[in-house]
């Protein structure tokens, strides 16, 4: 039996469509149908691979390395930028808690020397300097991996620490009354390059924003020493009055005013002395109460924050009128205080509570607390902006003609950038600490 079939050319062909008839044997017809089906499948498969290769741009000898493409097309992993971090010196647990101020969580705990007290962050955010009171040393922390990269010996009972705005020098007060000096550290090699005699029992230290002067609060002398940074010599001594016992010190960002916490005594109330840096004279005195300690200035210069230890409060001073405009209750024995570089939050470690209190500067209210190590004090400017990490490099894959899947490159581990979870440590029962000297 014979069949008549009609073959019509595809419309996509450039020649005009035409049809013709032919008589074909059934066996021949079956063979033709099978061959046609095979050709169609081959064309479809090849077309699919070629089209996919055109879309992906990964055709190599007729085979597409899909895994290689997907690996390269995936977004490059980025280490999150931690931004502004707070470094809290814990006097009793001999470590530093690193707090991410964007979410107020502890990212790392860094072991340092014995009785860490003062803290200063280098202006570029790459290093943190911590004074170890019982060790007579300064620990230098690398902020990229939160490890101590140097330990430098200084004088007796180092207390305050501040860094020059250009980052080249760190200044450390040696508070023991048998020492009474300021150690000057070259930050390029972490060595002491000068020792400057100052007043008796120096505690707080601050550097003028232009880097020309260093100011030191001398507890037992009730004075402030002024040091010329060009030659490391004392060029002036500012008297504060009898029994003032200054301890904390901070400079207004424009460099025009110096704020000093005067602890006073049981009979002499404490206050904040406001000093005009142009002539080194006291131009105002703000009553505070007994034993004000830490002091910090808001970056825009409009507010000063002072910790009052016995009261467990932070007092807010309006710099335009030199008056207290708010009192914020925090925990027991607040010591240091620092303001975020953007001015939105104030951080206050409370020594007995083993915590850090967070104050919203827009309304002077406590918005949270962060548990840290034992006996947090963090005396100094302990908040800084840490630089972002570089992107983690990835291996660019090469297309291959073999059917073997492209192996996935194992990414190189990156530093945790302060995100390592701190190791839990036992927390002793809070205990009162002695009155500051």
Image: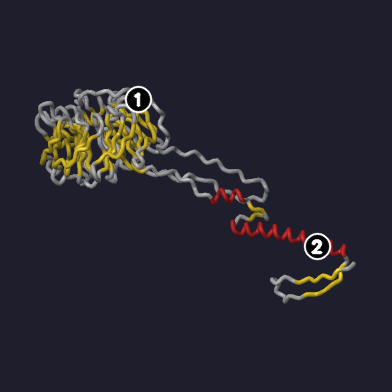
Task: Indicate which disc, 2 or 1, sits on the residue closer to the N terminus.
Answer: 2
Q: Nearer the viewer, residue 12 or 22?
A: 22
Give me the C-alpha separation between circle 2 and circle 1: 84 Å
Q: Residues within 10 Å of mark 2 (few under 14, many from 20)?
A: few
Residue 210, percent from left and from top: 23, 45
Q: Quadrant of the N terminus?
A: bottom right
Q: Nearer the viewer, residue 67 or 427?
A: 427
Instruction: State whether residue 183 appears in this view.
Output: no
Q: Nearer the viewer, residue 119 or 378?
A: 378
Residue 366, percent from left and from top: 27, 39
Q: Is residue 185 left or right of residue 281?
A: right
Q: Is residue 284 left or right of residue 165?
A: left
| Discs 2, 1 touching: Cβ within 8 Å | no
User: Callout 2: helix, strand or loop?
Assistant: helix
Q: Which residue is mark 1?
A: 427
Number of numbered labels in the structure image: 2
Q: Residue at image x 25%, y 46%?
A: 362
Q: Which residue is mark 2?
A: 33
Q: Residue at image x 76%, y 76%?
A: 18
Q: Residue at image x 53%, y 49%?
A: 74
Q: Residues within 10 Å of mark 1 (few under 14, many from 20)?
A: few
Residue 369, percent from left and from top: 31, 35
Residue 178, percent from left and from top: 20, 23
């Amino acid at each position: 039996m014979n069949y008549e079939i009609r073959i019509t050319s595809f419309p996509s062909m450039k020649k005009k469509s035409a049809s013709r008839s032919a008589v074909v044997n059934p066996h021949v017809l079956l063979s033709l149908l099978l061959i046609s089906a095979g050709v169609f499948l081959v064309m479809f498969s090849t077309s699919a691979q070629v089209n996919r290769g055109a879309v992906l741009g990964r055709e190599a000898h007729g085979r597409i390395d899909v895994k290689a493409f997907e690996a390269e097309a995936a977004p490059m992993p980025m280490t999150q930028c931690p931004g502004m971090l707070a470094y809290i010196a814990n006097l009793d647990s001999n470590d530093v808690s690193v707090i991410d101020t964007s979410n107020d969580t502890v990212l790392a705990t860094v072991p340092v020397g014995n009785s860490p007290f003062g803290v200063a962050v280098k202006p570029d955010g790459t290093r943190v300097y911590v004074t170890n009171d019982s060790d007579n040393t300064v620990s230098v922390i690398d902020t990229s991996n939160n490890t101590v990269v140097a330990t430098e010996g200084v004088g007796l009972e180092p207390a305050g620490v501040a860094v020059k705005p250009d980052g080249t020098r760190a200044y450390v007060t040696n508070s023991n009354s048998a020492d009474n000096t300021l150690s000057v550290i070259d930050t390029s090699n972490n060595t002491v390059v000068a020792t400057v005699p100052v007043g008796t029992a120096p505690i707080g230290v601050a550097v003028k924003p232009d880097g020309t002067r260093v100011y030191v609060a001398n507890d037992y002398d009730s004075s402030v020493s002024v040091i010329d940074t060009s030659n490391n010599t004392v060029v002036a001594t500012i008297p504060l009055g009898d029994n003032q016992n200054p301890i904390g010190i901070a400079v207004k960002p424009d460099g025009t005013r110096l704020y000093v916490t005067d602890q006073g005594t049981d009979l002499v109330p404490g206050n904040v002395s406001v000093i005009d840096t142009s002539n080194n004279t006291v131009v105002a005195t703000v009553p505070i109460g007994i034993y004000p300690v830490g002091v910090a200035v808001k970056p825009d210069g409009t507010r000063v924050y002072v910790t009052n230890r016995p009261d467990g409060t932070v007092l807010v001073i309006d710099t335009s009128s030199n008056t207290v405009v708010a009192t914020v209750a925090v925990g027991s024995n607040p010591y240091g205080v620092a303001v975020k570089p953007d001015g939105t939050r104030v951080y206050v470690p409370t020594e007995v509570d083993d915590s850090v209190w967070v104050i919203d500067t827009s309304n002077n209210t406590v918005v949270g607390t962060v548990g840290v190590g034992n006996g947090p004090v963090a005396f100094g400017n302990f908040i800084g902006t840490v630089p972002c990490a570089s992107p983690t490099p990835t291996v660019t894959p090469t297309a291959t003609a073999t059917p073997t899947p492209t192996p996935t490159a194992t990414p190189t581990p990156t530093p945790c950038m302060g995100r390592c979870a701190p190791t839990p440590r036992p927390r002793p029962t809070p205990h009162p600490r002695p009155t500051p000297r």
